Image (cartoon, rainbow, N blue to C red):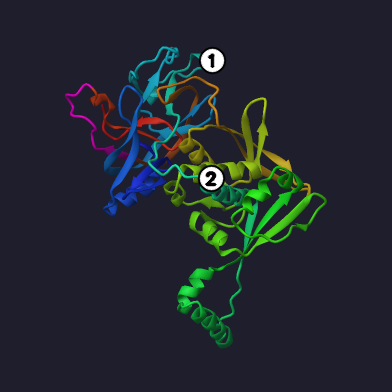
Amino acid sequence: MNTLSGDTYVFAEIDGQYGVYNLRELFEIHGKGHRIKVPTLLNERGEKTWVEVEDVMSFGEQSLERITLSRSRLYVEATEDTIIPAYSDNLFSGREKQIILKFKRANELKVTELIGNNNTLLLTTHIPLHILEGDQKEWDIGFALGFWLAEGSIERRKHKKTKQSLAILKGFAKRKGMTLEEYLEHMTDVRLVKLAVGQADFERGYVDIVQKHFKFSKPHKVTENGYVIYSFDLSLIHLIKEYTEGETSHNKCVKNEIYNRSWKFLEGILDGYLSGDGHFAKTRDLFYVGITTNYKLRDDLIFLSKALGYDVHLHNGHFEKSPSSNNYYYYLRLSISKNWHRHTALGLVKERIKSIEDVGKKEAFNLVLKPLYPENNTRAKFNHLYFTAFGFLILDAIKI
């Protein structure tokens, strides 16, 4: 039985719109009659496509194991009899011309204390979203949004629903040719946007970029090298509300709408975030990121990196002392490289397994995919495969 944790995230196209959903959510969405597609491997040349989901199956609670990779520390949770593409250490010798699929059950995977002897799994290097390329303005706007995710907050309005205040608001609405309801929706419940910036953000041009298309106040100095800039710009407020949720470092995250705009917009979001909360290690050509315990935002950064074709790695979290409060806080850590410095071939990367650990019983699900090829076709072996949002190539609920 091929089953995965209900918390397994997958890029999905639902009724023509892209997003990232876990299997539990897809089970509910499919039950409402929506059309779902997921990314898959099309052929031995490594081409990718989207395959239609015929069903989403629930298997109740199952005993699951977490398969963690040795380098990226990305993982997938599955039952021990789940079938998965797995290889010995001689895959990707540098002479690859085609992908030869080999499969093992999870309980057959070779895992020892010597990681160099362990089996390898396949991950995709990117997700094939069919969206517009975008332009410099799209990147600028994405950058502003990503920088806000890293360094921003919002302040909400405090409406007093008195007869006098409603009369004033109705007057404002009338002058704009709107009903009161339309005016309140247009003005939103957000009063202003704040960005915390440092001297380096001015010197590196980050503040200039966020001010390129949005109006901000003059900087207000709050510490020796720290400033706050404010914006009442409705276009910025609408951008934040349309593409993000939450308002603090503990609950901010992106909405699925970001994946339907443009590649430049996605690049800008991640570049903006890394400019705010990332540290670039030039000698290693990667960004280190440390964020507070916001697992949703951490996963969003992984999904964005996967979509854009970047190499992303998880790292062990650690406690850091806050200079302002002297309290210790736990930070999640990851690194992102825009360039692959390990061998890839045919749009895939191999990675050895680090460990397989029991994670107890969890709700388990899996997809049933429409076959790409007739069963008598030589490419029928590419039926029933799809990629998770962490990049793993896995099988659907149909056994081979």
Q: Farthest residue to the right: give it.
A: 224
Residue 30 as seen in the image, left or right of residue 152: left
The mark total stands at: 2
Secondary element at image label 2: helix
Give 157 or 143, whichever is nearer the viewer: 143
Q: Which residues are magenta?
A: 366-378
Q: Are marks 2 and 1 in contact (CB under 8 Å)?
A: no
Q: Amino acid at mark 2?
A: Gln
Q: Which residue is pictured at 18% across the width and 27% down the height?
A: 375
Q: Amino acid at mark 1?
A: Leu
Labelled disc at residue 128 = none
Magenta-drawn stretch, dominant element (helix, strand or loop): loop
Q: Which residue is pictured at 36% across the width and 30% down the height?
A: 394
Image depth: mark 2 or mark 1 in front: 2
Residue 350 as seen in the image, left or right of residue 277: left
Q: Residues within 10 Å of mark 2 (few under 14, many from 20)?
A: few
Q: Is residue 54 magenta?
A: no
Residue matched to label 1: 114
The answer to whether one can see residue 58 in this image is no
Position of residue 381 measured from the top left corner of the image (x, y, whole percent): 26, 24
Position of residue 115 measured from the top left corner of the image (x, y, whole percent): 53, 17
Quick check: 243 above or below 100? below
Quick check: 166 above or below 393? below
Position of residue 156 measured from the top left corner of the image (x, y, whole percent): 60, 67
Q: Which residue is pictured at 42% across the width and 48% down the height?
A: 260
What is the CA distance from the residue labelled 2 to the residue labelled 1?
48 Å
Secondary element at image label 1: loop
Give 318 or 233, whichever is nearer the viewer: 233
Q: Quadrant of the N terminus?
A: top left
Residue matched to label 2: 136
